[in-house]
Image (spheres, rainbow, N blue to C red):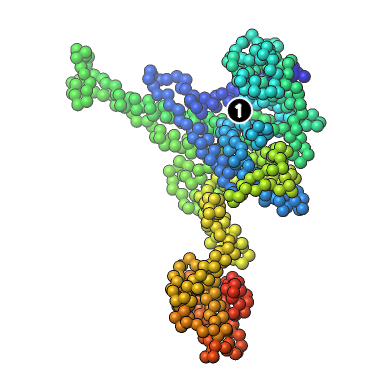
Amino acid sequence: MSRNLHSKILEAIGDRQTWETRQRLWYQMRHDGIPRRRKPFEGAADLHYPMADTAIDKFKPFYLNSAFGTQLLATFTPMSPQLGEAQGAAEQAFDWLTRNRTNFEQELDSTFDAMLMSGRTTMKARWDAQEKAVEYESVDPMFFIVPKSTTTLNKAPWLCHVKQLSIVDYEMESTYNQDPSFIARIKGGQEDKLDAGGKEQEKSQREGITYSDDDSIIILFEVYVRDAQGWIIHTFSPSEPDTPVRKPFRCPYKFQGKPLQPFVSFQFEVKDRGYYAPRGVCERLAPYEAYANKCWNTKADSMEFVTKPLFTADNPLANTNNIRFRPGDFIPGIKAVEMPRPPISLDEEINNTRLIAQENIQVPDFGASDQGTGESKTATEMNYVASFSGQGIQYRGRIAARSLADAYRLSWALWVMYGGEELSYFAAETRKVLPAQARHDNYLIAPNGSPDQWNRQQRLQRAVSRFQMFRGHPNINQEELVKSILEEDDPRLIKRLFITTSAKQANEKEDEAVEILLLMSGYPAAVSPGEDHQLRIRLIAGKLQQLSAVGAPVDPIARQRLQEHMAAHIQMLKQENPAVAKQFVQAISALDLTPSPDGAAMPGTPPPPLPGDSMGPGQGMGMGMGMGAPDMEGMAV
């Protein structure tokens, strides 16, 4: 079986030879630059305009922020309504575990980098039994081999992950064949061990893929073969394919009862159906970068002649060895050769090329420039250009979101299968254990948020605009509206700054009760702008009503302090909401807050309640009134 797989893998390597050659070219173009084929003179410039590398550096934050720019990584939609109660716990657990217990962010960064450069790459997820967590690995595109006919990984007949291990790492894997003679046969450093099997297969030999010149490196083929029940894993060395490194076994990973293989494919663009069809940033920008290099080198060559001019003489000079060229010297009979100016502006040509390249791949910061035309645009034109560019960027975000969804499903499946019953996580700085009703894979899992999450400033502006639009709206949850702004600024601020309406009212009631006790003792109490003046006015009025109804003797100074304090709150309320303050003044004027001469309650009809009261007078302050929130619509003038 291993021999047959080995032949298929070598055949697939030969089929992708053109792709491999181009990948090496893109790597050189990005890191070192493609050198000039012919220099016009010795010492001529050989500059590299980093167009592709710059574009990749701009794309990576877009992709990473699209994944990590939300409060939760993924949304879990239960397949059954009965499972909806634990949905939030599953989302919070997955988010915390992925961010804090795994290397997902680091490996996703490397995965996006490889995807942008090569067009397509692969991420691997496996369960680390020692760490008791999911472990991710960004697989180099050169080290992942699929059949020529492959379109999607789940439908491929086999998948091969080329693993380069040191001898120490190999010996730490207890499931591998630890026979010293076998290890000596499969380690690198000996060319005579190449098992090509014919001239055609010799073309498929690749240093680092099928063999290694380093005798401390062992190369293994980890092959996943698909059958009707799932995936079977075969592991062998290309140096000795007839001897398995470990016994074949079935991959145990499953999601919703369906077998899984541990690889997720990420691609930069959707093009042809072939696995190697997607182009990366380097391939898309190669002609533009080559032309920018030419313009840049031409400019440098021109500067060489301008700063080090040629000289000519009308007649032959005598004793030329005695002539010294120094600044400010005059040499008779010699004049500098004036070099003609370039017919075009090289700087403008480079800039135009860069802008065209950005338009070609729609770099995230593109959209408001003049595209090198030199003509100013109106605000409407710039908005249209930015909107059109934004659609392309969001489209690329949706392509990446499909792969992220596959990665999240695979990750959650591993946590559910191997995480155990005590799967703990932290939410709102509190340790929690995932409930049993949430520990299942019967969810529809998708990345949270939208592809434009990369633009943090834009998200914050939208949140502020939404808050201003719906502030005080009766059909909008005001607490969640405030949370949305804090979340876009920094999700940790929700825990530190946000206080619920019920908790705030409880704190305000308790604080005002203490102030009333101080006022009853004759001490003054300060009024602050940030207080809930409506609530505190009702509390003081409730206390005054209570005193008037009971008829208990009250110190005149204490009563005066209470009335002055209430007047101060009304004055503050006038600055914030004059209409509501006016209604409070009218309602308080209708109340009889003076005791009877004999100390008994005065007869008469009960006075009207204050604005916002849900209960009658004399029932406020916990020991008094029922403090409902004011009806803002009923108080509007």
219 vs 179, nearest the viewer: 179
The image quadrant of residue 600 is: bottom right
Hey, what amino acid is under mark 1?
Asp
Image coords of residue 263 (percent x, y): 68, 32
Where's residue 630, x and y in %? 58, 72
Q: Give the residue drawn at x 47%, y 73%.
A: 518
Which residue is the site of mark 1?
A: 140
Placement of the C terminus among the 4 image quadrants: bottom right
20 lies left or right of 524: right
Give the residue drawn at x 30%, y 24%.
Answer: 308
Q: Give the image location of residue 439, x and y in percent.
A: 72, 45
Q: Residue furthest right?
A: 228
| Element assignment for label 1 | loop
Picture quadrant of residue 393: top right
Q: How many marks?
A: 1
How packed is label 1: few (under 14 Cα within 10 Å), some, or many (20 or more)? some
Which residue corresponds to the image point at 61% horizontal and 77% vertical from the top-left? Answer: 619
User: Considering the image in quadrants, where does the N terminus appear?
Assistant: top right
